[in-house]
Image (cartoon, coloured by chain):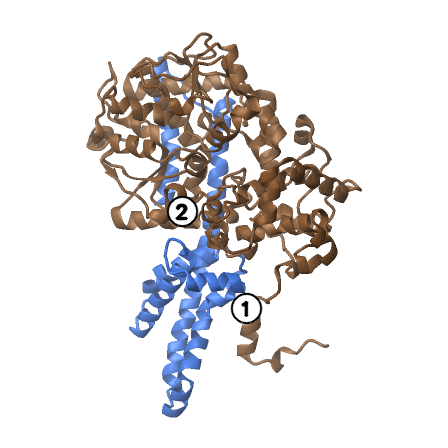
Chain colours: A blue, B brown
Amino acid sequence: MILETYPSVTSDFLKKQKNCFANPVGYNVSQGINGIFDELLNGVDSSEKFFPFLNDIIRIKAVQDFSPSQAISFIFLLKQAIREELKSKTEKKQLSEELSSFESQIDSIALLSFDIYMKCRERIYEIKVDEVRRMTFGLLQRANIVYEIEEESDLESATLLTQNKSSTLTKVLDKKG
Amino acid sequence: MAEPKPEELKPEELAKIEYKPPKTGWMDTPTVFKKGMFCYGNQPKFLKTVGFPNVRSWSVLDEDWKLPENWQEIFIEGLRERVGKYRSFRLFLDICVRCGACADKCHYFIGGGDPKNMPVLRAELLRSIYRKYCTTSGKIMGKIAGARDLTIDVLKELWYYAYQCSECRRCSVFCPYGIDTAEITILARELLNLLGLNTHWISAPVAQCYMTGNHLGLLPHTQKDTFDQMVADLEVVTGIKVDVPLNRKGAEILYYVPSGDMFDERGYFLTMATLLYFHEIGLDYTWSTYLSDGGNFGFFTTNEVAKRLNAKAYAEAKRLKVKWMIGGECGHMWRVIHQYMNTWNGPPDFLEEPVSPFTGTKFENAKSTKVVHICEFTADMIKHGKLKFDKSRNDNLIVTYHDSCNTSRGMGFFEEPRYVINSVCKNFYEMPENTIREQTFCCGCGSGLNASEDMELRLRGGLPRANAVKHVKDKYGVNRLACICAIDRAVLPALMDYWVPGVTVSGVHEMVANALICKGEKERTTDLRNEPLPGKEAKENV
């Protein structure tokens, strides 16, 4: 159902190609959704457990041709799938209460998904800014516009320069972590 | 018919409509330009510098692209001319049977899911125009024969997707007919250039390269400054003051690299590494401030401009009276050397067949171009035991290697970089078979798509590559992605940041220089990045 949100040729490919390296989207989506479903059935309370699975799927959707609502709509497809699957049973056995508590858990996953989606989008903008910063830092340095502390010997000033550069790098690396 | 009111639809029906895209044929599915998927349009001054036509200011999202009145005529004439001139182009347009073998091989399609990124369909965008104006069946039968009129929307669509192909040629590996879809993209871009339709990210470097010899427009004194800074940094790390031979006439070897290596952070470390390495072995060589870029963004515009930008390579070799050349770690620079340089600007009869001054090895593969890849040169040095390494300096690195599209598929270069990495690092792990060597996945940013404004395109296209890196990271704890391409070094960090945080990127020779034992060096406590070597962390904190 999730894969059908893609154009038909694409969804055929995403469904058929089973090699996880030839088809990372299909693979991550199916692994992620299996994980979410398992955790749901286990009755996990903490939404943190869902994070890695949701993250794998939403990280991909956040860079594809989806609006924010479309990108996280797959969570609600879960409701639809469960309703359709259990339709006769819920009516017979009057499970509507259980179903509604189950569904409110799905709602909380939806909220978490929204957070993850926003985080991914923010990350994209951060990456863009980092890239520009890396470029301009070199530029400023080369144009001798930025202030550099000068020391008596060349060697020492070079040390500072290197430390300066390496500290920018460390900052970038810290962010990655 | 009036639109149904929301309450007339059941929730499920509403859902269906929203989730599933309409099923229409590709010709009837309009292309919507999405931000993040394209680079900004070119500026007039850069077109003017190189003499490209239709110099004007325009914006991609504008309705009016300010084309000349007879733009259709120009495009179609240009198409006919090239179909007549290049037999391979005509063949590639004619023989595709749309078997679909290439369809799911493109990283942009795999990561993004847009059907028009299937190589077969992307090529079909141009093929349909070719059929209409260059074949009898297309002229008569039109759409039934897969032909369509060249309208402004068709042209815009072609532009949009010609700049969503990184010319990596992965699809051509799988084509039973050997169609090189990258060549179709190359020609499509060439035709678009007849109308002044390029991107800023490509046309600006082209103009700068034409004026200064490198894409970034670095003038000789800037390059000298950068080298001085590298020399100082190297002295801090190793205690050795290296020589930087610049524009030295009569040197045996002319060494040239992509200009990113003077500017980009990882490129900077790589150039430092090369300086140290060449100093240590005492290579009789020189850098050139004129041949200051091996890269050739002209290759992403037209054949003619690519040739003009590349002419400086042999011209400079002649001026400096060198015997032969070594080329640095670069991607499309090598595709150009390997596939085009000799017929564009050669043959370089004034150069000698490359022979290593240290091992006596004849590089017969470089007999015609006279340019040896630095990895070949180093692999040969290592094989003959000419270099001493302290591998443990790289023990903190768990390395995997990304085959750049151009060196792997463009010139069949697989073993040397791996041999070199294995000689200087203890921990090396390959990514899965169907993602490396000739099947390697592109970084998603080749052929001039490495701008910042098209980040979504880059991240989608890079997903298959990143996915394979993630696999080796999870399995073996890989923390270093090595590569031999300047664009890779510049863009893979962003890709890793998004998909596989914690994996750093470097050129191969940076690790070589880290491990290289040099005469007269002090005890090294840091690597070239000035970060503590394994086991030396405590000392660094004092």
**Residue with the mark numbered 2:** B465
Q: Nearer the viewer, residue B290 or B231?
A: B290
Q: Amino acid at mark 1?
A: Lys
* Label 1 chain ID: B
Question: Within 10 Å of the Cα at label 2, are there few (<14), some (14-19), or many (20+) other Cα atoms?
Answer: many
Relative to residue B155, is residue A33 drawn left or right?
Answer: left
Seen in the picture, residue B11 relative to B135 is either above or below; the reply is below
In the current view of this chain or complex, which residue is farthest to the right? Answer: B69
Circle 1 packing at 10 Å, graded few (<14), some (14-19), many (20+), is: some
Quarter occupied by the C terminus of chain B = top left
Label 1 in the same subunit as label 2: yes
Q: Position of residue B232 (x, y in %)?
A: 37, 18
**Circle 2: element type:** helix
Query: Can residue B529 be seen by looking at this rendering?
Result: no
Q: Secondary structure at mark 1?
A: loop
Extreme residue in the bottom direction: A92
Marks 1 and 2 sit apart, C-alpha to C-alpha, by 28 Å
Q: Nearer the viewer, residue B75 or B6?
A: B75
| Residue drawn at the location 36% of the way across and 83% of the way down | A98
Q: Which residue is nearer to you in this view: A79 or B386?
A: B386
Q: Quadrant of residue B507?
A: top left
Q: Position of residue B111 (x, y in %)?
A: 46, 53
Residue that carries the numbered disc 1 in the rendered image: B20
The x, y position of residue B1, in whole percent, is 73, 77
Nearer-the-camera pick, A8 or B355: B355
Provide residue A107's location: percent of width, then percent of height: 43, 71
**The quarter of the displayed image where residue B91 is located:** top right
Quick check: B52 left or right of A64? Answer: right
**Sooner in the amino-acid sequence: mark 1 or mark 2:** 1
Above-or-below relation of B319 to B135:
above
